[in-house]
Amino acid sequence: MFSTIKGIGLYYPEKVYTNSDLQSDFPTLKVKELTRLTGVNSRHICEKNETSVDMGLKAAEDLFSPSVIDKDEVDYLIFCSAGGDYITPASACVVHEMLGLNKNCGTVDINQGCTGFLHGFNLANGLITSGSASNVLLITSETISKTLHPKDKGNKAIFGDAAAATLISSNDKRKVLSKFIFGTDGSKFDQIIIKHGRERFPIEEYISEDFVDEMGTQRNHSKIYMNGSEVFNFSINKAPELIDKLLENANLQIDDIDMFVFHQSNRILLETLGKKLNIPEEKIVFELENNGNTVSSSIPIALKNSEKKNLLKRGHKILTAGFGVGFSWGGCIFEY
C-alpha cells in the first residue's frame, strides 16, 4: 500500500502586516535591503483571540469544501503546532470534536517547528503503509506572531501566521519514492527557543523581563529567540548531505526531480541552497512574498499555491526538505 497527498486546504488570517507597516514601526530599518534577503513583502497576522486551533479548523473546512472525501472516512488526525488551546488535552482532540470526525478516528499532537510537516507526513505514511489507517488528516497551524516580541524587528520581518490541512490517503499509483530521512542536533536546541512558560522555567517563578541582546535586539525569554546566522549556516551545511541521501535512496539524480519544495525560511537561504546544489532556479519553489515564514505550514502552502500556478502537476516528482528548531532536519521524495 502506498500513500499520497490527496488534497490541501489553506487558511490565512485576515489581518495583513506589510513592509510599509514594518517601516512605520521601525523607521531606521533598511526595509528594501531586508526585503531582498527575506523575499517577504507582507505576512498575515492572527487576531488576539484567534488560536492555532481556530486557524486549523478553517484550513480543514477549506480542504473539505470541494468534497475531496467524506469526513467520516478520516481515520487519523495529526495536529502540528507550537501552540494550542490548552496544555492538555491535545489540540487534536479539540479539533476532532469541532470538525465532527468519526469517533473511531485516532488523534495526536506533534510540535517540531519547520520540520513538523515532514514528521507529520512520515507518521501518516507509516499509518497507511502499515494498514492502520487509510486517510490521515494532517493539520499544521502556527500563530507564531503571538510569540514575537513587539520590538523584535528581525523576526517580525520574517514570520507570518497560517494554517494548512493536508489529506494523505492510500493510493496504488502515486507514492513516496524515497524513505523519509530525519536528523537532530540537540546541542543546538537553544538557538531557536521560547525559554519561559513550561516546566523548566514556569512563568509564575521566572519573570520574563526585557533586555537587549548582543545583536542590539530588545527581547525577553517568554518570546521567541532565533539565532539567524546559526540557523542559516546549519541549513546550508546540512542540506547537501540530506538531499544526496534522498536521491541515492530513490536511485534518482537532480535532473529527475520536477520541483524542489524546501521549507520557506527566507529567500536568500533558498537561493544559496539552489546555487550550492546546482539546482535550476525554475525548479525551486519560492512562496514567501505574501506569506512570510509560516513554520510548519510553509511546505503545504508552497505545494498548494504552486499547484494553483500550474508549477506542480499530478505525477511530478517532488523533493521536499525542512530545517529548523531543535536543530532538526528531514525530507523525502514523493509523487505529487
Image (cartoon, helix red, strand yellow):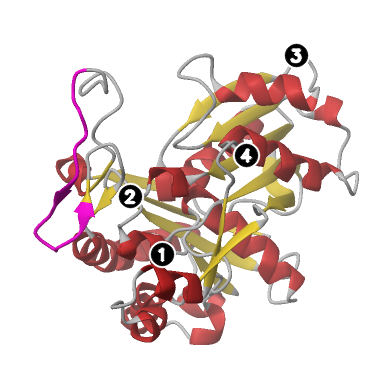
**What residue sits right under mark 4 in the picture?**
139
Say few, some or many: other residues with alpha carbon within 10 Å of mark 3 (under 14 / 14 to 19 / 20 or more): few
Q: Position of residue 260 (x, y in %)?
A: 52, 70
Tell me, yes or no, whether the highlighted magenta stretch contains residue 207. yes
**What residue sits right under mark 1 in the picture?**
158
Answer whether labels 4 and 2 touch (C-beta < 8 Å): no
Q: How many marks?
A: 4
**What residue sits right under mark 2 in the picture?**
149
Residue at (19% x, 18% y) in the render? 205
* N-term mark: 2 or 1: 2
Q: Position of residue 245 (x, y in %)?
A: 36, 59
Q: Nearer the viewer, residue 216 or 7?
A: 216
User: In front: mark 4 or mark 2?
Assistant: 2
The stretch of residues the image draws in magenta is: 205-218
User: In front: mark 2 or mark 3?
Assistant: 2
Q: Nearer the viewer, residue 186 or 135?
A: 186
**What residue sits right under mark 3 in the picture?**
104
Residue at (87% x, 46% y) in the render? 65
Q: Is residue 298 above or below residue 142?
A: below
Q: Is residue 89 left or right of residue 139?
A: left
